[in-house]
Amino acid sequence: MFDNLSEKLQRVFKNMRGEGRLSAANMEDALREIRVALLEADVHFRVVKQLLENVKQKAMGEEVLTSLTPTQQVIAIVKDELVKILGSHESKPRFANEPPSVYLIVGLQGSGKTTSTAKLARWLSKNGHRPTMVSVDVYRPAAREQLRILAREVDVPIYTGAENETKPIDLARSARRETVQSGRDVLLVDTAGRLHIDDELMTELKQLKELLNPVEILFVADAMTGQDAVRSADEFHKALGITGCILTKMDGDARGGAALSIRHITGQPLKFVGVGEKTTAFETFYPERAAQRILGMGDVLSFIEKAQEAFDSKEQEKMQQKLLDNEFSLEDFRDQIRSIRKLGPLESLLGMMPDMGIMKELKNVKVDEKEINRIVAIIDSMTRKERVNHMLINGSRRRRIARGSGTSVQDVNQLLKQYTQARKMMKSFSGGMLSGALGKKLGKMKLPVF
């Protein structure tokens, strides 16, 4: 997410630092390079123009040019302007005064509406709501069946409709009635899409809007389509009055042009982003965090939130005590690896780290998921006693473990080496290497022991 743009902007700021002091001339050069970087990232030209005008106005002042840290001040100005473009603060979903709150999910065919509907249903469930879903897409083969399968996966009820309900309006009306009767508080309506915007599609959506009076009309767009997504969002907004956007496939979009453009062009916020195929790969969009990632500052807050959601705090306290007591076993090591995988792809997690020190090097690491599977297989091939006490694992046991896991003795040796190194490192961190205000703050957050 934003990788290409982030890399280019960091190169601009590195060149600025190399100038020693800033002048009007080299500031103009930097702004020109920022313009090119934004346009190459497929950011809408109107957004680029507005952002650069604001940055130039603030950065060319005497106070910045004569500052002892002018480059840092320019970076801060660019960050603030990126945040403004992206929306200043996260836009939370709205709810009706009288339930159910109806969310109309709209967009073109293939944008990811059905999957996003299920992901949003899961997100709402995790955040204290009781959603239900309905698909009114009566045109696309198996569209309603797809949502039914996803409903089972996210454990959210779905209204499937009676045999005689073959029209979107009839399905929507019955689904709302069913939602009221079952005491659910949110109804998510997955609508039909087309390959392009046409009168028939818009007429149907307007009828649904009139019937359901939705509190949210969420436009779903594929981030990979760049400015096409922005144009479609604008057209949907003019016809329907959308209240927000969901961008899918953000994990595969290294440019980020749609995310940076969509709010400025439509005037409506980007509320959620899809960052993978799984129903868990769905996040609230935070403008400030996105700006930090673009500028190489990382997104540690999102990482912490993911960790807190995936890790049981009581289990983590027990794990920290084991480290302090020197009782961290191979079984614990395996369980930690499994827990970390709940957070999502490891490369995505590394992308949340700031571009500095060892983290900068780690961000370039290509994570081999097969290697992780191999580690788990090796530990699973050990006996309970061996997992608790790795000192028991002699030469003959290593050969047996290698055969049982379909690996080599060298692989087993390498794992044991990695385990002992990880054990030493984690013990040193748990034993007090993190101190002072930062250590206290992290301690309160109950971060996972990796």
Image (spheres, rainbow, N blue to C red):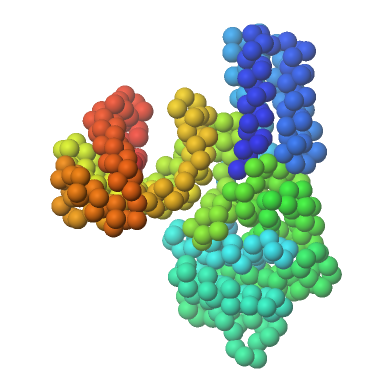
Could you tell me residue 397's position as x and y percent? 20, 50
In the displayed structure, 182 sits above or below 427; it is: below
Q: Is residue 48 left or right of residue 430?
A: right
Of 378 and 11, the residue lying toward us = 378
In the displayed structure, 128 sits above or below 141; it is: above
Whether residue 92 can be seen here: no
In the displayed structure, 171 sits above or below 343; it is: below
Quadrant, the C terminus? top left
Q: Is residue 32 left or right of residue 162?
A: right
Q: Is residue 311 left or right of residue 116?
A: left
- Quadrant location of residue 321? top left
Of 16 and 418, the residue lying toward us = 418
Could you tell me residue 351's position as x and y percent? 52, 39
Going 50% across and 29% down the picture, which residue do you hit?
360
Of 172 and 8, the residue lying toward us = 8
Could you tell me residue 262's position as x and y percent? 71, 47
Could you tell me residue 380's position as x and y percent? 28, 56
| View extreme (right): residue | 199
Whether residue 242 can be seen here: yes
Q: Is residue 331 left or right of residue 272?
A: left
Going 53% across and 70% down the picture, which residue do you hit?
150
- Quadrant location of residue 115? bottom right
Q: How many marks overall? A: 0
Quadrant, the N terminus? top right
In the displayed structure, 328 sits above or below 32; it is: below
| View extreme (bottom): residue | 164
Going 34% across and 45% down the picture, which residue do you hit?
411
- Quadrant location of residue 166? bottom right
Going 45% across and 27% down the picture, which residue do you hit?
358
